[in-house]
Image (spheres, grey):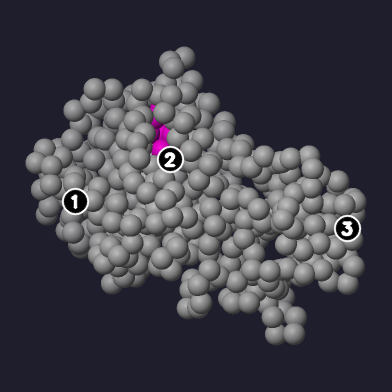
């Protein structure tokens, strides 16, 4: 077994485990509590922890208000994450009361912040009480604290651990792309064969939208597949350099925001204006590639989540170099996964200042938003990531070097 393969298996096992360790659980009670009743105390004092407020209801329940970081209109991605520290074992009712929008994320639970499971279907009631949309979660708690969140928590600390693991490979060069408005690091990984002179570049980005965790769950094994030791990945790395910016909105991620950065901006509507420091870093990265006489951007992919799996691409009649790449890639993926309906929309939001539109319009390359469903099966996401990465590499290797736009 080559070290490359061994390394690949190592990081994949980490991915299969859900995600890297998120937070440490101290044996003592946590604080400061946001609210408590006779049975349990609630806090949000950890990365991605966020609720608006909470209060004890009678003596057995908790009512939690869920509200966005900025006033509506805002995308209805009602994130929540909190920790319950039981005072004694027993049944606990928690009502999520949505102040804006309604329920989106089915609750997940974890005792260690690392391994997460969906709360069972029969333990969640979605409805409306006195005109307020709510989700009631009924939990049978032991004596240990548990995390409850809209999705698995993948915070900036998890990205740091993931990058540290990947950086053990000589194929990976990790660096600081820059910093967010609040001073958090925005890392970038470069993947290429050692001493490579590959000048064709692909750029992958993630987490513009903080709660879109399934976008991260697909991006991580996608990137790991590019690091595999098999001949396909070796040939790919010999010709292409991949630049990965896995978490463009670290402030939003660690604050548990629904959508924005701390500048009250949806970063994926800021491509063109570049009014935010995070998107300006991407503008600098991409324009730097374009300005280098011997470098060539070939593909741009932005990872997100929505209610179902879908690939948002530019239309096939938009000229790109390489030509018709997205159609060829997704056709190949469909052939590889005949039982999976590859769902493509080439006409979604073509006028927005989003990354897909901007990067195509400015650089003439194929661009795609890779959206994974909020509740898509987690094991399937890993399979999809690997097949999507392999078919991307095959399709890129089938292109002519230095092909011009049609
Ligand atoms: Zn998104």
The magenta segment is: 221-228
Q: Main secondary structure of the magenta part?
A: helix
Q: Quadrant of residue 21?
A: top right
Q: Nearer the viewer, mark 3 or mark 2?
A: 3
Q: Residue 360, how many percent across, how many down?
A: 23, 58
User: Is residue 226 found inside the magenta-colored segment of the image?
Assistant: yes
Q: Earlier along the polypeptide chain: callout 3 or callout 2?
A: 3
Q: Residue 333, how many percent across, how many down?
A: 39, 46
Disc 1 target residue = 287
* Disc 3 to disc 2: CB gap under 8 Å: no
Query: Does 284 appear above or below 172?
Result: below
Disc 3 target residue = 39
User: Is residue 78 found inside the magenta-colored segment of the image?
Assistant: no
Mark number displayed over residue 222: 2
332 sits to left or right of 38: left
Q: Earlier along the polypeptide chain: callout 3 or callout 1?
A: 3
Query: Does 301 appear above or below 198?
Result: below
């Amino acid at each position: 077994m080559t070290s490359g393969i061994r390394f690949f298996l190592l990081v994949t096992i980490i991915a299969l485990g859900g995600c890297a360790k998120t937070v440490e659980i101290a044996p003592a009670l946590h604080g400061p509590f946001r609210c408590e009743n006779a049975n349990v105390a609630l806090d949000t004092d950890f990365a991605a922890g966020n609720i608006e407020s909470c209060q004890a209801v009678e003596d057995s329940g908790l009512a939690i208000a869920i509200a966005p970081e900025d006033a509506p209109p805002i995308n209805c991605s009602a994130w929540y994450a909190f920790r319950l520290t039981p005072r004694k074992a027993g049944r606990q009712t928690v009502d999520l009361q949505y102040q804006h929008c309604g329920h989106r994320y089915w609750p997940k639970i974890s005792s260690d912040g690392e391994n997460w499971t969906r709360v069972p279907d029969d333990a969640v009631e979605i409805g409306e009480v006195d005109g307020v949309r709510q989700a009631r979660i009924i939990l049978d708690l032991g004596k240990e604290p548990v995390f409850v969140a809209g999705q698995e928590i993948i915070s900036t600390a998890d990205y740091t651990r993931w990058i540290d693991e990947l950086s053990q490979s000589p194929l990976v060069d990790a660096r600081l792309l820059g910093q967010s408005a609040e001073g958090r690091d925005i890392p970038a990984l470069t993947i290429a064969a050692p001493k490579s002179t590959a000048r064709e570049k692909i750029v992958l980005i993630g987490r513009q939208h903080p709660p879109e965790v399934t976008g991260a769950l697909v991006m991580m094994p996608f990137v790991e597949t590019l690091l595999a030791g098999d001949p396909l990945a070796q040939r790919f790395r010999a010709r292409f350099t991949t630049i990965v910016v896995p978490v463009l909105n670290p402030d939003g991620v660690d604050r548990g925001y629904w959508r924005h950065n701390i500048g009250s901006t949806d970063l994926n509507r800021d491509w063109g204006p570049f009014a935010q420091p995070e998107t300006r870093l991407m503008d600098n990265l991409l324009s730097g590639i374009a300005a280098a006489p011997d470098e060539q951007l070939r593909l741009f992919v932005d990872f997100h989540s929505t209610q179902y799996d879908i690939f948002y691409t530019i239309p096939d009649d938009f000229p790109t170099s390489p030509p018709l790449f997205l159609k060829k890639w997704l056709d190949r993926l469909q052939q590889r996964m005949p039982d999976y309906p590859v769902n493509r929309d080439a006409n979604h939001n073509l006028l927005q200042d989003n990354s897909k539109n901007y990067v195509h319009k400015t650089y003439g390359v194929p661009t795609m938003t890779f959206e994974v469903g909020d509740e898509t099966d987690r094991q399937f996401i890993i399979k999809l990531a690997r097949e999507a990465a392999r078919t991307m590499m095959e399709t890129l290797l089938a292109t002519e070097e230095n092909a011009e736009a049609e």
